[in-house]
Amino acid sequence: MINCTETAIAELLRLKKNLDFDHEVAQRDRVYVRLKIEKGGCQDYVYQLNFDGEISEDDEKISPITDITIVIDRTSYQYLKDIKIDYTEDLMGGAFQFKNPNIKEHCTCGLSFKLD
């Protein structure tokens, strides 16, 4: 199960509200939060969190609250199904934090991780 803290949900709602919609995304309620993993970083993989106006039949759909729907492609879902998403702020700014029990190790930068 995907878990989002209240601060993560609040930040996603803030970003969604301030999002500039292009001509392809006509309605705010049809914008989803897409979470996935991609090859990259110093430990093999990185998290990607973006807004997306499209959803496919193979996407897993998670709605922690009614105003936000998180979609995850099937390949990424197997590694993200127990993730906790948080949002924190400090003097350097704010960032989403991902706590994932399915990963083997993190890079010291905290941005990339190893699965196997």
Image (cartoon, rainbow, N blue to C red):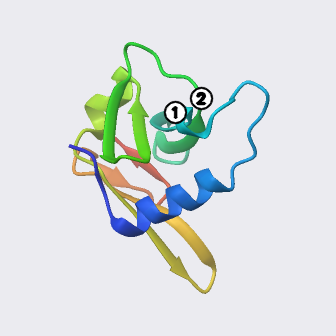
Query: In what quadrant of the picture does the C terminus appear?
Result: top left
Q: Is residue 104 left or right of residue 15?
A: left
Which residue is label 2 attached to? 53
Name the mark on residue 25. Answer: none
Above or below — where is 63 with respect to 108? above
- Residue lying at 51% horizontally and 56% vertically, measured from the top left: 12
Residue 64 x, y percent position in the rendering: 30, 49
How many residues crowd mark 2 within 10 Å: few (<14), some (14–19), many (20+)? some
The picture places residue 62, in percent across and down from the top left corner, at 31, 37
Residue indicated by mark 1: 39
Q: Is 84 placed above or below 41 here?
A: below
State the CA–CA distance, disc 2 to disc 1: 23 Å
Residue shown at 46%/46% (left/top)? 43
Tell me the crowding category of disc 1: few under 14, some 14 to 19, or many 20 or more residues within 10 angstroms, Cα based.
few
In the image, residue 108 sits, relative to residue 23, either above or below, namely below
Whether residue 116 appears in this view of the structure is no
Please provide percent x and percent y for residue 23.
Answer: 79, 27
Q: Secondary structure at mark 2?
A: loop
Residue drawn at (59%, 29%) of the image:
53
99 and 57: which is toward the camera: 57
**Number of numbered callouts drawn:** 2
